[in-house]
Amino acid sequence: MNTPTTTEHDFRTPHPFGRQAAGTRLRNALLTLAGLGSLGLLATPAYAVPAFARQTGQACIACHIGGFGPQLTPFGRAFKLGGYTLSNGKSHIPLSAMLVASYTHTTTDVQANVDYNGEHANDNFIPLQQASIFLAGRLSSHVGVLAQATYEEAAYSPNFGWDNTDIRYANSYQFGSVSGLFGLTLNNNPTVTDVWNTAPAWQYGFMSQPIGQIGGYSTPMIMGLGEQVLGATAYTLINNHWYVELGLYHRLSSYFSQLVNAAAPDEIAGYAPYWRFNYSNTVGNANYEVGLVGMNTKTDASSQDYNISGANNTFKDIGVDGSYQYLDGDKQSVTVNGMFMHEHQDYGAVGQGNSNSTDTLDYLNVNTAYWYNNTYGATIQFFNVAGSTDPLLYANNAGFNPDTSGVVWELDWNPFGKNWADPEKNLRLGLQYTTFNKFNGSTQNASGQNSLYIYAWTAI
């Protein structure tokens, strides 16, 4: 399978594992477990992980809105920035697991596809959409890990491979009146280090349907690199307000990508610099954040996708984000998150999959969530993708552009969200409905992409 390019990647895409025969999948699953185990890694985004509750002795509502992530509270953000190392001093096994079952109904039948392993053109019930195992917790006084391996029956054949991985070192410092926290991370997804649920790796939607349309397929390059690169970043939080993070990412080697069952982006050239700056503050029961994030990525146009000797394509992403959160104790909470990202695409040559020498792509995600008693939740999200008109790049789209917009509505019930008397059970039942105002450059029949998605999501 070719690695998704910027114009082929959903902003809530299933993980891009390859299509394989059953014997190959089993062999790769065993190799993945062996490889991740030898690295100290058992790596879909990681959410409320019961292993952290056992490690800290805190209820999951201490770290997560609704007691079931990934939306973080101020305590949860501090726990992550501190390297996942806070502990109650008791011994525990730093392992957790997650299971997801789902049902999807699409307004228009999806095209029959053997890659769906017998699923129907509509009304699909998948008893095991996803299963994950986590290594999550303190490795030493200053080092911790949140890593996940996932089996997923999604857009491609059922598969098993590594997922979002974040290994951290963190320590505090004091210089006169300046106090802060310093950290280093090794991770496999740009923005997976973020703590505000605004950046791509952690923004809403947290769980999405495996079949049908889940948004415009054109998204910024930064959002298509998860689990396909490896990077190191350094960060600091100064006086509990100013946050700075800088890092570099590189494509996985062919050997390692096969070991962990990831689709390596062979066309990425050299190192891609990543940066993140933001300011945050707390006022009474509310906290807020405003920030910037950016990344420059080059692709080798001599790869199989472009076949242009000596030419590079450059994708420059820059985004602005903001977050507001109001917490009324355990009774209710309101969170508003948003991000706008602009990408400038500079192509090494015209006529090799693109009509223009330069294109632009804009992406917007704004969502509001309300929770009552950490048990009942409602979320509404507006998404919008807009870009240049390019007859080759968007040859299959009306108007030859990627313009897509819509709204996602979700209701959630976390029956065990309020307290953790029994830390071995956690459950979310969700009902999600996606409506499209425009799809791939056209408003005509956009509503035909609408879908209903119901899921049961448990963690132990």
Image (cartoon, helix red, strand yellow):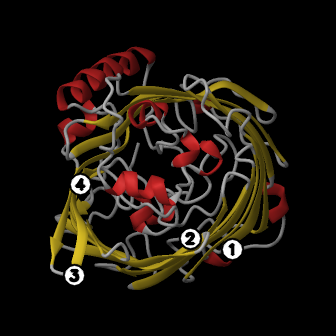
Q: Position of residue 422 (x, y in %)?
A: 60, 23
Residues at badges 2 and 1 in contact (C-beta under 8 Å)?
yes
Q: Position of residue 248 (x, y in %)?
A: 20, 64
Q: Secondary structure at mark 3?
A: loop
- Relative vertical location of residue 94 with respect to residue 333 in this rendering, above or below: above
Residues at badges 2 and 4 in contact (C-beta under 8 Å)?
no
Q: In the shown orientation, is residue 114 left or right of residue 123? A: left
> Which residue type carries mark 3?
Ser
> Which residue type carries mark 1?
Gly
Give the residue at mark 1.
441
Q: Position of residue 60 (x, y in %)?
A: 55, 40
Give the mark toward the camera: 4 or 3: 3
Residues at badges 3 and 1 in contact (C-beta under 8 Å)?
no
Disc 2 to disc 1, how far (Cα)?
A: 9 Å
Query: Sequence order check: which comes first, mark 2 or mark 3?
Result: 3
Query: Sequence order check: which comes first, mark 2 or mark 4?
Result: 4
Give the residue at mark 4.
185
> Which residue type carries mark 4?
Thr
Give the residue at mark 3.
177
Query: Sequence order check: which comes first, mark 2 or mark 1?
Result: 2
Disc 2 to disc 4, how far (Cα)?
A: 37 Å
> Which residue type carries mark 2?
Tyr
Q: Residues within 10 Å of mark 3 (few under 14, many from 20)?
A: few
